[in-house]
Image (spheres, rainbow, N blue to C red):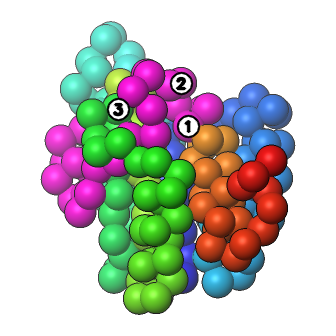
């Protein structure tokens, strides 16, 4: 199974890239994490709706076939670490790829939300989208550590 993190934004600060790569590297092959950076839509002239529509189009094009799409959004169902571990157990059992979508500065648009089979929230707080990459990668690693009995989760 492959987990693809579809994230709007490019050229992240070094600390974001370093932290994301550290957690992604720790995950084993059977649930490898891949980052797909999506170019943000142009917000020239304040046309936010057009920018979100561009991002939606790019996100949908990056999904791939036979992939469960999960939108990470503040208004999604809260995702606890234990709940994520349970979901990961089910994902590993069915082997289907997963795509976790992270929106840009204005969030995910209606077309991205429409293709998502689920909506999850990592926090009730509004998080900066670069930080969501790091949190998602860390939580995926933590969930896997629970499933494998690794002591990381208890630390």
Q: How many marks?
A: 3
Q: Upstream in the sequence, badge 3 or badge 2? A: 3
Query: Which residue is at a point 71% across and 81% down the rendered structure image?
Result: 29
The quadrant the N terminus occupies is bottom right
Q: Is residue 97 visible?
A: no
| Circle 3 residue | 74
Residue extending farthest top: 45
Q: Nearer the viewer, residue 9 or 2?
A: 2
Name the quadrant containing residue 51: top left
In the image, taking residue 62 as reference, residue 119 lies left or right, namely: left
The answer to whether residue 46 is above or below residue 27 is: above
Q: Mark 3, mark 2: which one is toward the viewer?
A: 3
| Circle 1 residue | 132
Badge 2 crowding class, 10 Å Cα cut-off, few under 14, some 14 to 19, many 20 or more, is: few
Q: Nearer the viewer, residue 74 or 84?
A: 84
Query: Which residue is at a point 83% across and 43% down the rendered structure image?
Result: 18
Q: Nearer the viewer, residue 112 or 148?
A: 148
Badge 3 crowding class, 10 Å Cα cut-off, few under 14, some 14 to 19, many 20 or more, is: some
């Amino acid at each position: 199974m492959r987990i693809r993190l579809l994230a709007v934004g490019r050229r992240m600060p070094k600390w974001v890239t370093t932290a994301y790569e550290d957690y992604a590297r720790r995950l084993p092959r059977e649930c490898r994490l891949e980052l797909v950076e999506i170019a943000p839509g142009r917000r020239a002239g304040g046309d936010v709706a057009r920018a979100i529509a561009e991002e939606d189009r790019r996100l949908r094009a990056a999904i791939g076939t036979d992939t469960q799409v999960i939108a990470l959004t503040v208004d999604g169902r809260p995702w606890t670490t234990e709940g994520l571990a349970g979901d990961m157990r089910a994902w590993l059992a069915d082997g289907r790829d997963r795509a976790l979508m992270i929106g840009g500065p204005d969030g995910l648009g209606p077309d991205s939300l429409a293709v998502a089979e689920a909506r999850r929230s990592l926090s009730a707080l509004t998080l900066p989208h670069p930080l969501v990459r790091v949190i998602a990668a860390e939580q995926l690693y933590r969930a896997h550590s629970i499933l494998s009995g690794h002591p990381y989760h208890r630390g």
